[in-house]
């Protein structure tokens, strides 16, 4: 089955930039989608098709994808960005695959 | 806007059954695919099942295949998940999620999510 690996945690100071990686074999050939989930809340789609932001998602959230690593970048981090972040792809053999998840802590 | 409200969760003994419901509003329910996704305590997100807009095509994760059944009532804008032969490892918050399309052939994702409902399987 297809596996996506994320760092368990990332810490960042307010106003700085957080980068969350998602590693998978040849992930650059797939479309990667990212979700934010705050404690006790529903997940929210923050980017899809690697880098497209849904309406209402701030421009501070951006995505990229190449070779074996996809990255979600959060610029000018705010306290409200503290949450779990999951990458996700669709694989013809594994169906919907989520990454292991990364908790972003705002210092 | 899109609203998805899950119900039917609770505590159930191993081996028993439970049916979850998801009431949808704010969009044309009968034109979108729908999913169930779960998150076990201390774990990450896991896709459970999908059903396309017409209720004919259904897909399941290997962990629930043969035990869970996804269905929908387009006349009442409601999605269901019938869960049989429940196990302790099925304990999780279950989310109803909308597909961005009527069905998905590739590069699929989840457009909108409900707040989730807790299912606890314990004796």
Image: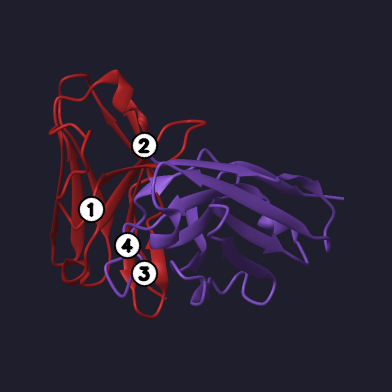
Chain colours: A red, B purple
Residues at marks 1 and 2 on the same chain: no
Q: Camera-side residue: A12 or A38?
A: A38
Residues marked 3 and 2 touching at CB (< 8 Å): no
Residue A13 position, x and y percent, is 22, 21
- Mark 2 and mark 4 lie on one chain; the one further toward the N terminus is 2
- Residue linked to disc 2: B1
Residues marked 3 and 4 touching at CB (< 8 Å): yes
- Residue linked to disc 3: B103
Q: Camera-side residue: B55 or A32?
A: B55
Residue B89 position, x and y percent, is 68, 58
- Which residue is drawn at the image coordinates 29% and 49% (left, top)? A34
Residues at marks 1 and 3 on the same chain: no
- Residue linked to disc 1: A48
Specify few, some or many for label 1: CA neighbours under 10 Å numbering under 14, 14-19, or 20 or more: many
User: Looking at the rendering, in which quadrant would you find the N terminus of chain A?
Assistant: bottom left
Regarding residue B44, the answer to whether it shows in the image is: no
- Which residue is drawn at the image coordinates 17% and 72% (left, top)? A29
Q: Which residue lies furthest to the right in this view?
A: B123
Residue A66 position, x and y percent, is 12, 62
């Amino acid at each position: 089955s297809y596996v996506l690996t994320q760092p368990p945690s990332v810490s960042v100071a307010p106003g700085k930039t957080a980068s969350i990686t998602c590693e998978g074999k040849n992930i650059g050939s797939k479309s990667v989608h990212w979700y934010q989930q705050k404690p006790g809340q529903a997940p929210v789609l923050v980017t899809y098709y690697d880098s497209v932001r849904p309406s209402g998602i701030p421009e501070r959230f951006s995505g990229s994808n190449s070779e074996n690593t996809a990255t979600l970048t959060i610029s000018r981090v705010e306290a409200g960005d503290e949450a779990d972040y999951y990458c996700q792809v669709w694989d013809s053999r594994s169906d919907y695959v989520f990454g292991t998840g990364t908790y972003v802590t705002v210092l | 806007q899109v609203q998805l409200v899950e119900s039917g969760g609770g505590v159930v003994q191993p081996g028993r059954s439970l049916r979850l419901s998801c009431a949808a509003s704010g969009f044309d329910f009968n034109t979108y695919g729908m999913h169930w996704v779960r998150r076990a305590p201390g774990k990450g997100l896991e896709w459970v099942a999908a059903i396309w807009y017409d209720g004919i095509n259904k897909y399941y994760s290997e962990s629930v295949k043969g035990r869970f059944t996804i269905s929908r009532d387009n006349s009442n804008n409601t999605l269901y998940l019938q869960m049989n032969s429940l196990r302790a490892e099925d304990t999780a918050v279950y989310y109803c999620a909308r597909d961005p399309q009527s069905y998905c052939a590739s590069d699929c994702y989840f457009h909108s999510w409900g707040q989730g409902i807790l299912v606890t399987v314990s004796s």
